Image: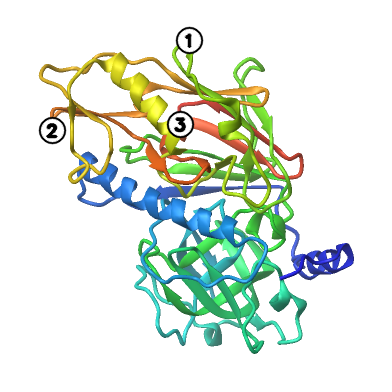
Amino acid sequence: MAYFPLLALMALSSLLRSTTPAPAGLQLGLTHVDAGSPFTFTERVRRAAQRSRHRREVLEARLANSSGDIQVPITSSKFEYKLEFAIGTPELNVTAILDTGSELVWTQCRPCDPCVQQSTPVYDPSDSSSFSRLPCTSPLYDYQVFKRFDPPTCHYAYGYGSGATQGVLAMETFTFGTKSVSNITFGCSRQSKGNFAGTSGIVGFGRGNLSLVSQLGFRKFSYCLTSFNSSSSSHLRLGSLATLNGTASKVQSTPFLDDTNLYRVSLRGISLGEALLPIPNATFEYRRDELSGAVIDSGTGQTQLPKPVYEIVKQNITSLVGLPVVDLSSTIGLDLCFSVSSWPPPPVPDMTFHFDNADMTIPPANYMYPDQNAGAFCLVMQRSESNLTIVGNYQQQNMHVVYDVAGRTLSFMPARCEDL
């Protein structure tokens, strides 16, 4: 599928502008998909490991097919954080996955066959006075992010590598707390397959014109994710509320690369404590149209490292910990675990990801998992067979992260997210 010329993209942008001005800023609650469940901490880590592997497949499939039509395999897919809002007139409360790695906003609509199970009632457009289906002549049906049908039809299709949605494009009123915004373009899904954690769909926060942050006209957004096992909600802030309240010495900033939908950053190296790991510089190099470089993502649980990088990290952590290695991959789902005979485990230093002009310090609690019941101490990162590095949300716990979309900059600083 060819890229749209500038005039076509400008036309799409005008089509996607809401007729109701968005507020200057919004704050929404984020809930982990396993929050409120009876799962133990170990089970949550194992489930997050499974989701992270699925998520890597999602992003790799999207990048591998970013410049052409794709065939989407329909299997299971699991994501991480969900948000609540309302859709339609009268309002219907729904929950959807926050996804910085995709663009489309969509929810399941009646009639829907087949559809996945969701915890809230399925939205019925015939019950809403503010629903408006886009005509089949709308240029949005030819937009780059959708697969083309053969022959073309008045439907969209959007793939997630291990899940998919298909339906019609429409406009509707979305309500966030007490703020309502009309004429948001969204996918009214008539068919969906995969596992979307009991939610009604996905809210894309990528950099494209169809994403929610773009449609609302916000220049930036932020989130602060509470500890993985915390019962407190995390926060998503948009617009003027997405600011870092810290000293300049604590705030780190690095530019986004290129104009793709994903949030790419330039990773230069990794340190353990004061020691820079012996990773060749070319390992993290970003090459266009290849599964390479680094992406920061809200939908990936555990950071994914290219195999050569992972092996170096694994080797150095093994030397630091100095304990026997035990295979718990079938129970915890993590590749590197140590057997701990006396508690607590030995201390490990901070890990640092070195980006262009910024250092992301990852404390031990954000990359090592102590399981006293199993007598184990495990690395919460995974190996990838591609050259793509994905910085996951487990490593972003208790970190306030700001995506300045207009300024093409990622900023972050450590924070106690429960207090924000």
Q: Is residue 213 above or below residue 140?
A: above
Q: Is residue 334 left or right of residue 352?
A: left
Q: Nearer the viewer, residue 52 or 178?
A: 52
Residue depicted at 47% across the width and 34% down the height: 396
**Residue denoted by label 2:** 374
- Categorize mark 1 by other alpha carbons within 10 Å: few (<14), some (14-19), many (20+): few
Q: Nearer the viewer, residue 103 or 287?
A: 287
Which amino acid lies under the numbered mark 3 shown in the image of this protein? Val
Which amino acid lies under the numbered mark 2 shown in the image of this protein? Ala
Q: Is residue 342 left or right of residue 171?
A: left
Which amino acid lies under the numbered mark 1 shown in the image of this protein? Glu
Quadrant of the rendered image containing residue 204: bottom right
**Residue denoted by label 3:** 309
Determine the CA span between mark 1 and mark 2: 31 Å
Which is in the foreground here, disc 1 or disc 2?
A: 1
Residue depicted at 29% across the width and 14% down the height: 347
Q: Give percent across and percent down for residue 134.
A: 70, 82
SS assignment at label 1: loop
Q: Give percent across and percent down for residue 145.
A: 65, 66
Q: Is residue 194 above or below residue 403?
A: below
**N-terminal-most mark, 2 or 3:** 3
Determine the CA span between mark 2 and mark 3: 27 Å
